[in-house]
Amino acid sequence: MGFAKYLEDNYSRFYGTSIVRRREHDRFFTGGAQAPLENEGNNTKMNTSKLKDFTVAEARPLPVIVLADVSGSMSEDGKIEALNQSLQDMIAAFAVESRMRAEIQVGLITFGGSRADVHLPLAPAHQISSMETLCAEGRTPMGAAFNEARLLIEDRDLISSRAYRPVLVLVSDGQPTDDWEPAFEALCRAERAQKATRFAMAIGADADTDMLKRFANDVESPLFEAHEATDIPRFFRAVTMSVTTRSRSTTPNTPVSLSLADRPSDDDLDLDF
């Protein structure tokens, strides 16, 4: 039963009870004669119509777009396995959020080999039943991923004007192998994409930390450096906490820092998985 229908039924019961009481009152004071109730039917229809016009406010989208490095080096030391599990856990955590104010949506762009792909189209987290497992191979075309992210965010058919500011999450363990700077600058200058909150994680000693530091735009959430695969879930849990805190806030457009310097350990993170 919808909320508007619930209100309508309650009103009908109340209004019907009032009519019965008024008729009993008339019988008592007029010796049994029943006085007509003028406009009784019209009043009921008018008030019922007003109730039907009432609708519950729809939650606004809060897009979270992950740019994931799936180049060949991610196949080493359990990194791609940790990334797959972390993404699944994050989506599962988003799926159980209340959606009172914000509906968390998730999209995944992968870059590896010679191109970037939209691996998981942007969709409400609670509607994502499964995610195809990521496999690692090839080079690191990060610039192509920036182009895909910009096109997605600027597409008003995919992300409506009602949406809250998006979150971009970049994960990489290597050096970009394409001409990434023009694509990155275009992303930063785009009308809507420039308003996004950007987080980044560098995995291992071979990651381009200088470039990734430029990507992260929250001064309170500096580049997270994962020294081994076990650090990857900790980063994604921090991202999950940041996004869910925003979705529950009265001001979901306000960024919430990862607070990496004071971030709790895995045992302290209670995300209701």
Image (tube, rainbow, N blue to C red):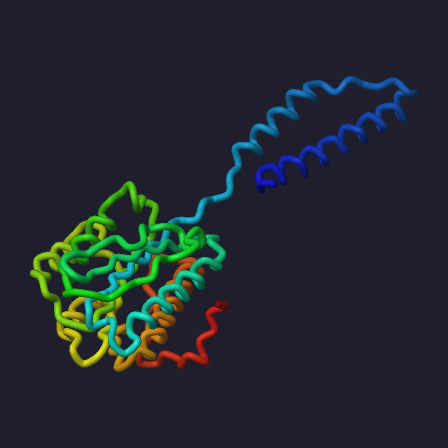
Report the front residue among 140 and 14. 140
Q: Residue at x 37, y 57 (%)?
A: 131
Name, please, the residue furthest toward the right.
Answer: 31
Q: Is residue 31 visible?
A: yes
How far across and down, in percent of the image, does residue 4 sit?
A: 57, 38
Q: Is residue 165 visible?
A: no
Marks counted in the figure total 0
> Taking 191 as reference, is 252 left or right?
right
Report the front residue among 145 and 136. 136
Q: Residue at x 36, y 76 (%)?
A: 234
How far across and down, in percent of the image, does residue 133 sit?
A: 34, 61
How far across and down, in percent of the image, does residue 204 sit?
A: 22, 79
Report the front residue among 171 and 137. 137
How far across and down, in percent of the image, does residue 223 sit?
A: 23, 74
Report the front residue among 72 and 123. 72
Query: Where 52 falls versus 209 (above or below)?
Result: above
Query: Where 59 falls versus 18 (above or below)?
Result: below
- Residue 267 sits in which quadrant? bottom left
Q: Residue at x 19, y 58 (%)?
A: 145
> Taking 68 as reference, is 86 left or right?
right
> Taking 134 as reference, is 177 left or right?
left
Q: Residue at x 40, y 61 (%)?
A: 91
> Taking 272 as reference, is 78 left or right?
left
Query: Where 184 falls versus 226 (above or below)?
Result: above
Query: Where 263 falls versus 83 (above or below)?
Result: below
Quadrant of the frame with the N terminus: top right
- Residue 238 sits in which quadrant? bottom left
